[in-house]
Amino acid sequence: MITSQRLSLLVGLLSFLYVWFWREPSTPAWNPQTPLPFPETHYAQAAGCVQQTYCPASNIVGLEVGDAQLIWTVGDSDAQQRVNIYRSASLGLVVAYAGTNVTSKTSMAINNDYLLDKADPLLGLPAGVKVEGGAQRAWKLHWDEVLEAVQREEPHDPAGRITVTGHSMGAQLAIIASVALEKLYKERVYVLTFGQPRVGNRAFANYIDSTFHPNAAFTSSNSSGSSTLPPHLSYVANGHDYTASLPPKILGYRHFSGQVFIFPANSSTYRVLQGQENRDGTASIWWAGYSMDDHQGAFMGTTLGDIHACPARVGDRF
């Protein structure tokens, strides 16, 4: 009998083979640079906050990372993914999720669980919305603790900003967490993620687009002529990073809008892409060009995903 863990590993293997051998080739676009929806310094600061989640030895309350101070942490990135909470002068309260711990069998098993599951009732999502099962279970393991910390530490100013961020699998968890937080804090919630895989199905992608307005950077006004809500979400893909093509679309997944494409990798050349699954971003990279190195690189000048770059330093690559 095939166990659920073996089935997940089999699906992960088939997905990997699909990405590397059956992906339709195309050529990267060389269009003019598009302005970022948020200040570059905000991306760099968020990247630094996430990088620190990979640094357990120096992950001590009171540590300063750029303009942020670590005020709470939970998880070991083994049984539970690590989550750090900071106070930041530029980003407000920051909730940062660590990515996959490749030395942990538990973390890797979660990472390779590509089966779509119904959205957890806690998220309050419409019928038909599905998300990656492994990511959703990892998010729920310590969501009660994370939410309690956010409610205790969040800025009591009605305009106070809450920024949710993460890298790799941590980016998936950050997206799920941002959906839950938006129910409570509405337009105060902003999302900046890095090296993000796909998170859910088309219905989920449509929900994210309608809730966080990632395409608003391309629209100055709505049909009535009044200003639209500003974008509240952006996710960054670095060069030939393979993770943006996982889990593959053949399994029912779809990227939502809001991708910022760094090309060439680790550079300061960015393109903001409109719409879902835009072929001018990572979707333009042919399978033969995928790189694991670009997954751990320089995101807006900040090293991210490197366990040796500890403690984290904002802007260390520029």
Image (cartoon, helix red, strand yellow):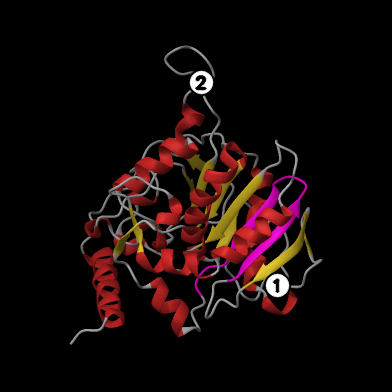
Please provide percent x and percent y for residue 187: 58, 37
Q: Is residue 211 magenta?
A: no
Quadrant occupied by the N terminus? bottom left
| Range of residues picked out in magenta | 82-100
Asked whether residue 195 appears in the rendered view, the answer is no
Residue 123 lies, in percent from the top left, at 44, 52
Return the residue at label 1. Answer: 310
Q: Is residue 174 visible?
A: yes
Is residue 64 rendered to the left or right of residue 304? right
- Looking at the image, is mark 1 or mark 2 earlier in the sequence? 2
User: Callout 1: few (<14), some (14-19), or many (20+) C-alpha neighbours within 10 Å?
Assistant: some
- Which one is in front in this view, the residue at disc 1 or the one at disc 2? 2
Seen at 51% across and 34% down, the residue is 34
Q: Main secondary structure of the magenta part?
A: strand
Q: Amino acid at mark 1?
A: Cys
Q: Is residue 172 above or below residue 156?
A: below
Q: Residue at x 75, y 54 (%)?
A: 87
What residue does disc 2 label? 220
170 lies above or below 264 = below
Residue 252 position, x and y percent, is 25, 55
Q: CA distance from mark 1 to mark 2?
A: 41 Å
Amino acid at the residue labelled 2: Ser
Tag shown at residue 36: none
